[in-house]
Image (cartoon, rainbow, N blue to C red):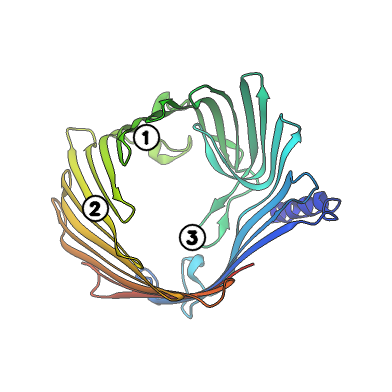
Amino acid sequence: MRIMRFAVIILAVACLPLLAHPAEIQMTSSTQYSWYQDFLSNDEDQNEIVEYLRLNATKLDKDGKVSIYGYGRVIHQFSDSIEERPEIASDTFGRMYYLYLDYRDAIKDHLDVRAGRTYVSAAAAAGTVDGAYLDFKNLGPLGVTAFGGRRVIFDNKSEIGTSGDSLWGGSVYFDTVKFTHIEASYGRKYADEDLATENIGLDFSTTPHEKVNVYGRMKYDIVSSRFNEVLAGLKVAPLKDLVLRGEYYYSYATFDKSSFYRFFNINNYKEIGVAAEYQVNVDYRIYAKYANEDFGSDETANLYDIGIFARPIKDLTLDVSYEYRQGFTGKLNGIRFHGAYKIYRATILAGIDYDDFRREDSREGTAKKYWAGLNYEITKMLGAVVRLEDNKNFLFDDSFQGFVALNINL
């Protein structure tokens, strides 16, 4: 937390000379009260009050290059029982998702800077850091990024981690004709100042034709000396309203260098999938997907998914999908139905999820979820939301939860 307070002070000091220029401020606030059941708690009935706040301050300088973006929450958990898990004890927790200074063209046409708590992403590594992200662009045909800082680790409701947890890395990228992007990256993660993971990655995307997109990503674990993720995909639009997609995905679970789980034999996972989506007209869309899942050791499964999105009348939207899976660990099929109907300033929402499963080595039965909600626009800047939900499965006959929220947009 001391590091976070220091980051806030740095951002504030940096912006003092800029605030003389009229800035654009956007704020979103959501105050929520929620209740639910936690079957691992001494007190099953839990409730909490949460305040979410997002603040965007743009055009802090006359050229519109400097902005500040922030988003966080404060949550108070109510519980009268003594809990072994501190995250559900009666207490107040804060969480800052991001708060950073964004300086575009810090060096004209050559450098963009983000500093503070920010999310960094590359094929080799990704995460939230208290640090900085630098993008050196237009270096001839190339660009170079560098990022690093204290690695932010979120727990259930709080933030954990030490100053010895960090994430560092960077990339070299190349953008050329036909919307072609090639990026090679490197990333290192530390836990308590000890090396935890070290990866190199490659990201690729190209559009050789306006109706064709080819993309891929791979990540290599240097510590384990093997690839732990490979993705290759093709997206084609042969007709105006038809989109086809095919993907191959390979994954091998890797853990931190000091993790106990590194000593276990782990099967790799492979998936080959195809999908299609057809826009019948502005009110109807149908989609379908098939995937063959390979869990290693000759264990496979087939997954089928089909659905339709419809707007039969002006203010009514319906989304229905059916999923069927058969193979490794058993059989599963289920249907999901979601609907929304708008009346004046109110939107009524409801849904049903129904799953029927048959496990080879354990249980069988059904799981059902029923939910309903109401969004009401009080004014252009003020709205209210109510949602209620009931879950039924092999663990319990009913599990009720819900929330009410007051949202403000300024």
Q: Secondary structure at mark 1?
A: helix
Q: Is residue 162 above or below residue 32?
A: above
User: What amino acid does circle 3 point to?
Assistant: Asn
Label at residue 307: 2
State whether residue 85 is above or below residue 187: below
Q: Residue at x 59, y 64 (%)?
A: 73
Residue for point 76% across, 56% down: 23
Task: Single out the mark in the foreground, 1 or 2.
Answer: 2
SS assignment at label 2: strand
Q: CA distance from mark 1 to mark 2?
A: 42 Å
Near mark 2 (Cα within 10 A), the count class, few <14, some 14-19 or many ≥20, is some
- Residue 229 - label: none
**Tag 3, which secondary structure?**
loop
Residue 194 position (above or below residue 365): above
Q: Are marks 3 and 1 in contact (CB under 8 Å)?
A: no
Give the percent coordinates (x, y) of residue 153: 55, 50
Horizontal side, residue 138 vs residue 360: left or right: right
User: Is the residue marked by circle 3 packed among few (<14), some (14-19), or many (20+) residues within 10 Å?
Assistant: few
Q: Which residue is mark 3?
A: 156
Q: Position of residue 396 (x, y in %)?
A: 25, 72
| Nearer-N-terminus badge (2/3) | 3
Q: Position of residue 311 (x, y in %)?
A: 30, 61
Give the CA distance from mark 2 to mark 3. Answer: 33 Å
> In the figure, 274 relative to 316: above or below?
above
Residue 318: quadrant of the picture? bottom left
- The span from disc 3 to disc 1 (Cα, nearest Å) is 27 Å
Camera-side mark, 2 or 3: 2
Res. 106 image quadrant: top right
Any part of residue 85 in sight: yes
In the rendered structure, are the residues bearing label 2 and label 3 in contact, judged by CB atoms less than 8 Å apart?
no
